[in-house]
Image (tube, rainbow, N blue to C red):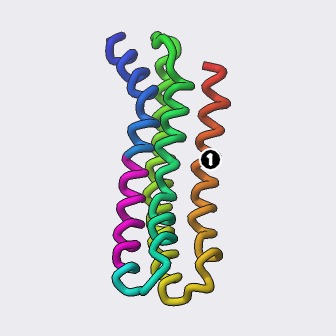
């Protein structure tokens, strides 16, 4: 039984990095596909479309930092906390990555039709990044007490 408890602790340590990577990959893929479509339909401004496509990549960085912050000896007394913090912050990064990718895709699609709203159309993606930062800070602060 103790092996299962310890395994959950180890899972919690690595979950933020794994879920952050999955969210970043999905989000960058969603935005990248919109970027490719926009490049086919416009005659310039390709760099900004590619740049927007990379926005969700920050979530894997947050996950890596959380993973290193949570890394410690796993015991039966701390595995529950490691699992909870790691899993929940990882899920927050995963969903932030997916939804940020969708927001970036919408921004790309809107700005190809109306280029003057390019900067303003990035606001939803920035707000979603803010939620990921909240989860990141939460995990860092809580990990100090585990």
For residue 101, above or below residue 85? below
- In the image, residue 109 lies in the stretch drawn in magenta: no
For residue 113, above or below residue 120? below
- The boundaries of the magenta stretch are 22-37
- In the image, residue 36 lies in the stretch drawn in magenta: yes
Q: Nearer the viewer, residue 69 or 57?
A: 57
Q: Which residue is mark 1?
A: 133
For residue 109, above or below residue 59? below
Report if residue 81 is visible in the image. Answer: no
Give the residue at x 59% y 55%.
129
Q: Nearer the viewer, residue 56 or 52?
A: 52
Question: Measured from the top left, where is residue 13 in percent x and y?
Answer: 45, 26
Left or right position of 135 against 27: right
Left or right position of 140 against 24: right
Give the residue at x 36% y 56%.
26
Judge the density around disc 1: few (<14), some (14-19), many (≥20) Cα neighbours within 10 Å.
some
Prevailing secondary structure of the magenta residues = helix
Question: Measured from the top left, where is residue 97 in percent x and y?
Answer: 46, 54
Give the residue at x 65% y 20%.
145
**Label 1 element class:** helix
- State the quadrant of the N terminus: top left
Give the residue at x 48% y 22%.
80
């Amino acid at each position: 039984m103790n092996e299962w408890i310890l395994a959950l602790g180890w899972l919690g340590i690595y979950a933020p990095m794994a879920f952050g990577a999955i969210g970043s990959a999905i989000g960058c893929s969603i935005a990248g596909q919109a970027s490719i479509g926009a490049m086919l339909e416009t005659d310039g401004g390709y760099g900004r479309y590619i740049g927007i496509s990379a926005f969700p990549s920050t979530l894997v960085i947050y996950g890596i930092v959380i993973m290193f912050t949570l890394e410690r000896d796993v015991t039966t007394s701390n595995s529950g906390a490691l699992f909870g913090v790691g899993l929940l912050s990882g899920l927050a990064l995963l969903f932030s990555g997916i939804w940020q990718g969708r927001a970036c895709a919408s921004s790309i699609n809107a700005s190809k039709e109306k280029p003057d709203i390019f900067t303003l159309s990035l606001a939803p993606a920035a707000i979603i990044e803010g939620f990921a930062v909240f989860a990141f800070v939460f995990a860092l602060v809580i990990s100090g007490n585990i």
